[in-house]
Image (cartoon, helix red, strand yellow):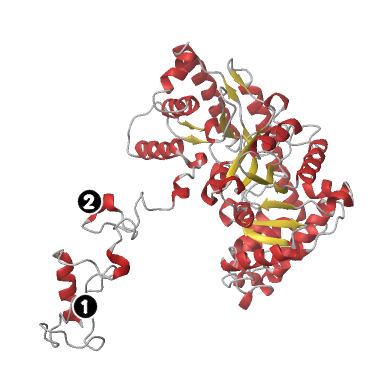
Amino acid sequence: TDRMAGLTAAIQRADLVPPPDICPIIQHPAAHPSTPGVHSSSPLHRFTAPSRAHSGLSASRLGYAKEKMSENGPWGKVLTIDTMNPTVKKVEYAVRGPIVQRAVQIEKELREGVKKPFAEVIKANIGDAHAMGQQPITFFRQVLAMCSYPELLNDSSFPEDAKHRARRILQSCGGSSLGAYSASQGIDCVLQDVARYIERRDGGIPCNPENVYLTTGASDGIMTMLKLLVCGEDEGRTGVMISIPQYPLYSAALAELGAVQINYYLNEDKCWSMDLSELKRSLKEARRHCNPRALCIINPGNPTGQVQSRDCIEDVIRFAAKERLLLMADEVYQDNVYAEGCEFHSFKKVLFEMGPEYSDSVELVSFHSTSKCYMGECGFRGGYMEIINMDPEVKAQLNKLVSVRLCPPVPGQALMGLVVNPPQPGEPSYINFIKERSATLSALAEKARLTEEILNTVPGISCNPVQGAMYSFPSISLSKAAIEEAANDQAPDMFYCMRLLEETGICLVPGSGFGQKDGTYHFRMTILPPMDKLKVLLTKVKEFHQRFTNQYS
């Protein structure tokens, strides 16, 4: 009754008895007959002593934060910093770390009229193309608009090929609506289109749509595969090889899952190429304390902007085959290749062209996304992964795992379908599509060239060619005095980047957030800002580095 509940709450507030989840305080009269000394009609029918199972347990063993009791009442909060999942506390993501948080604060201060030595914050910390001013592809947005609001299919201002794509997508959706769940693996027509795209890209090598899974961006696919992969304890714990410098998604995911991060270092002196001897060294050392099971590659590279050669990819495949490692190929920048003589080679294409010795046995998962390349549609969270040579029993478990999430965002799936099936020659939208696509990629190539050129004029900064992707990862020389100044509370390149932000409004990410060889210092910057802002950014970095060097010389 309400009265009984009120009395119970009052007693608990008075600290007279433990809470009901440790000791049931009030038993309903129907459950227990009258007890001597307590009238059965009393709303406080009977007290019970703590059960034998509970009586010998401390509050901390029962899941209560003993050290928090004085702050939060006698029983404290269930979830505290001490009782939360410890692996979550190990997760770090530098791309949105302290530098970016401070940049947001500075933007707020500028809006409030606080005087700064600059008028705006220029963010070059993350590969978010549209946030930097890149315009969306018209055809993609036309189709998505009609899919979201089908009445637009009757609007004569939309081209017929866009209407055809929209109708086809809607016909594959439940109730002809983007608002309906799709199948867990993805919209059927999009899965078909992804498979045909992969076949065209790889020169006719077959792709089975049943091996394609649509994902919430590439990150979702990567996390899903790591969940399947990670197991074991102590020396049997799963180890995963990742490149250093690395995209922090990988280190964060491995920390969250309790896996062992196995670092292999890219060769900065050879434009951040992979080195077979380094892979062997890394693997040999790792096998002393864990069970290495996978090798991750980002190509083109993030944060380092390199494009791996075909010979390098063949070496990696042979290495994985010999050492029995699953390959995870992060290929989300596959259209972002700028340097003369460089070409994107998909791991799948190279694998199958190496013949059945490898193509029949090496386990490969490759990833793509709508967020990068010329599209830059980060917010739609569209992506896919293709699995090669997966054990059928494991694939059944993968199907179960993806079914738990229901499905990726359906608008993102639709966009992924457009990316892999854009306007074709002879269709009404083709000329404009090619014009927009080419303009975006040409602008990125020019900005990649300019970034390398200007940074390499600065004494103390060395920048490898930005062969692909969307980033530069230059090394910076820091004096002993600067390193000692930073040593009090932060990494030297964090100190450098924070000073850069405070003095110029330029927001970059320190190399320590991506991993780097001991004794070296870097920063990562995107090449995405509009050309006029990029020139301002590079000029400010140049001037700041000269001042900083003079101050700590």
| Relative side of 286 to 6, left or right | right
Q: Where is residue 443 in the image (x, y as percent from the top left)?
A: 67, 37
337 w.r.t. 177: above or below: above
- The residue tagged 1 is 26
Q: Tell me the element at label 1.
A: loop
Quote the CA–CA distance across marks 1 and 2. Answer: 27 Å
In-front residue for pair 449/157: 449
Q: What residue type is labelled 1?
A: Ile
Q: What element carries label 2?
A: helix
- Closer to the camera in the image, 321 or 22: 22
How far from the left and from the top, in percent, is residue 46? 17, 79
Q: Quick check: 544 left or right of 424?
A: left
Q: Which of 353 and 172 is in front in this view?
A: 353
* Image position of 239 with respect to 174: above or below: above
- Give the percent coordinates (x, y) of residue 435: 73, 47
Q: Which of marks 1 and 2 is in front?
A: 1
Q: In which quadrant of the rendered view does residue 472 lie?
A: top right
Residue nearest the viewer, comparing 536 with 463 = 463
In contact (CB < 8 Å): disc 1 and disc 2: no
Amino acid type, residue under disc 2 in the picture = Glu
Q: Which percent across, then down, holds residue 155?
A: 64, 69
Q: Which mark is residue 71?
A: 2
